[in-house]
Image (tube, rainbow, N blue to C red):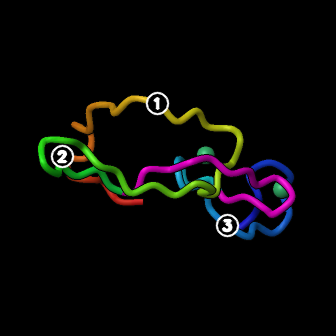
Amino acid sequence: MQCWVCGLAAQGVCRFCGRAICKDDAKTLPFFLEVFPSNGHLLGLALDDALYCGICQPKPEPVPMEFLEKPSEGE
Ligand SMILES: [Zn+2]
Ligand SMILES: [Zn+2]
């Protein structure tokens, strides 16, 4: 796997978009692993420094996930 940015060997994968990324180009962003209701409030399990490629633009708000409901057509 090669880094999306510079083409060298990648050391990780962006948590948000799945692009492969090397250590030099990798950045971090907070990432919510899970959100669950508790006593009428929503609590989230968060990771402060999830691997981020710096290219994609994760949305701050949840977006509809209808596309996950369709059967994938292979890789
Ligand atoms: Zn790179
Ligand atoms: Zn990304």
Q: Position of residue 21 (x, y in %)?
A: 73, 58
Give the foreground label among 1 and 3.
Answer: 1
Quadrant (top left, top right, bottom left, bottom right) of the C terminus: bottom left
- What is the distance, in whole Å, between disc 1 and disc 3 at their CAs? 23 Å
Q: Main SS of the magenta segment?
A: strand
Q: Residues within 10 Å of mark 1 (few under 14, many from 20)?
A: few
Q: Does the residue at mark 2 contact the one at mark 1 (Cβ under 8 Å)?
A: no
Where disc 3 sits, the SS reads: strand
- The residue singled out by tag 3 in the image is 12
Q: Is residue 41 left or right of residue 31?
A: left
Q: Which residue occupies 19% across, 45% down? A: 70
Task: Check mark 1 vs ligand 2: CB closer than 8 Å? yes or no.
Answer: no
Quadrant (top left, top right, bottom left, bottom right) of the N terminus: bottom right
Q: Which residue occupies 67% across, 59% down? A: 20
Q: Position of residue 55 (x, y in %)?
A: 69, 38
Where disc 1 sits, the SS reads: loop
- The residue singled out by tag 1 in the image is 60
Give the foreground label among 3 and 2.
Answer: 3
Q: Position of residue 29 (x, y in %)?
A: 62, 47
Task: Check mark 3 vs ligand 1: CB closer than 8 Å? yes or no.
Answer: no
Amino acid at dot 2: Glu
What segment is highlighted magenta in the picture? 20-33
Amino acid at dot 1: Pro
Q: Position of residue 6 (x, y in %)?
A: 86, 52
Residue extending farthest to the front is 39
Where disc 2 sits, the SS reads: helix
Upstream in sequence: badge 3 or badge 2 = 3
- The residue singled out by tag 2 in the image is 69
